Image (cartoon, helix red, strand yellow):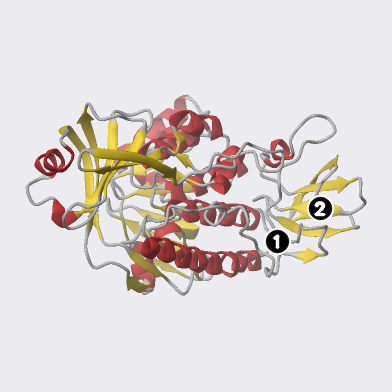
Amino acid sequence: MLSAAAAILSRLSCNFSLDIRTAYHYDWFRTMYEIKVLIVGAGPAGLTLALDLARRGTSFRLIEAGQTPFEGSRGKGIQPRTLEIFDSLGVIDSVLAAGAPYPKFRTHMGPWSFRAGSLGSSKPPTEAVPYPNLWMAPQARTEAILRERLRALGGEVEFGKALTTFTQNERGVEAKVSNGEIIHADFIVGADGGHSAVRKALGLRLQGEAIDDKPMLVADVEIEGLDRLDWHLWPFVKGGAMGLCPLPNTPFFQLTCRARNIDGGIETTVRHITGYRVQRVAWQSIYKPNIRMVDRFRVGRVFLAGDAAHVHPPAGGQGLNTGVQDAYNLGWKLGAVARGGPDSLLDSYEIERLPIAAAMLGLSKKLHKTRSIRRGDATNQLALHYRTSPLSSGLALGSLHPGDRMPDARLGDGSRLFDHLRSGSATELVTSQGPRILVRPDGYIAHIGSEHSPEYAGAPVGQIHGVITPG
């Protein structure tokens, strides 16, 4: 450590304009100053939070226990509301390019096969809903896109650094990392998955139930000669159905089946059931479908987000999406408090997100039990709202209520409302009908009324003019 200090001091004496990034890479130096937020876990929720903080200029560090990025397809379904968040964060073009609409099912029964519907819809975009359909992109690719964007904003993921323990008091938190480093921050956010070290250190338990006692296998496999236009199902396999879903812009299929079906190995079993040869198994995991969540999302200066707070089965594609939206809800609030806003703003995180996580778990359980492929609008998360939140006030405007997701709109100058919301600041829409709609930094309506709002959560409010058709 002394030699590292000497090296820095030597450079300072020669060139006082030392790049702070050079100093940042000396671990001992990092313990000498505080950051606002320590994010633990670099999955979709942690990366979303880091991106939101980065664009707000809020200091953070993002540590990840894994030595390398996640490589599997696990959470491949991206819901319409999450696509809107990715639009706001500046990654929508990359996400759309990396994915594709959900394919139709092709069911195989002996020598016969037939096509059925799809989990995704095929609705045309509208002015209010620019991304109306479920989108498929392998989770590893989604995470890579978020990391690329984070790097462009000057951030990074610190791999191979696991949280070992932490303490907190009224001034901040002190966290110890597996490499011996001590990190001081104002807040910690645990986005470190179902086995969350942050949650365990808080003494919180994931409460709920295992909704299926038979372990499931999910794997990314390369299959020789299998048609990639459809999601292939073999429903009457002994021990449970087998599915092979083509993953867009990759050579792989996502294999799903009962783990006990793979008694002779993935290659042998797939060849026996489907008649096709597995050329490569790139990734695999075994899990039990669970419906579990904690009863608190905040304990003092520590927050939980994503799978650290709620664990979903794959049915309905709610896990990744609910975690991303946890992070997006929390990011602007942490940024506001970092600028000197009231700490009470952070209490609304649990108030708003806990009941939504519970509702999404209930939906996932229902879809898992019924095995229905009918989704409609139930899973797209566009209708989720914060109407009962203490941050929502004012009167309804047609079907729009304070706390609702603000729909997109084409404004008089030809721009989209969502173009203005990418700033990450609160925005006031002055409507030709008379009412003013104050939109929070996360795209939900804070207030509808006649009075002007020059400031929100301690920051200036942008103002635009337009017409809203509330329905």
Q: Which mark is residue 403?
A: 1
- Secondary structure found at label 2: strand
Question: In which quadrant of the rendered view does residue 269 lie?
Answer: top left
Q: Count the marks: how many?
A: 2
The kind of residue on which mark 1 rests is: Gly
Q: Is residue 69 left or right of residue 129?
A: left
Across and down, in percent, residue 133 comes to 54, 42
Disc 1 + disc 2, Cβ < 8 Å:
no
Inspect this view and state whether residue 340 appears. Answer: yes
Across and down, in percent, residue 271 comes to 13, 38
Q: Is residue 349 left or right of residue 25?
A: right
Q: Which residue is mark 2?
A: 437
The kind of residue on which mark 2 rests is: Ile
- Secondary structure found at label 1: loop
Q: Residues within 10 Å of mark 1 (few under 14, many from 20)?
A: many
Whether residue 224 is situated above or below residue 446 in the rendered picture: above
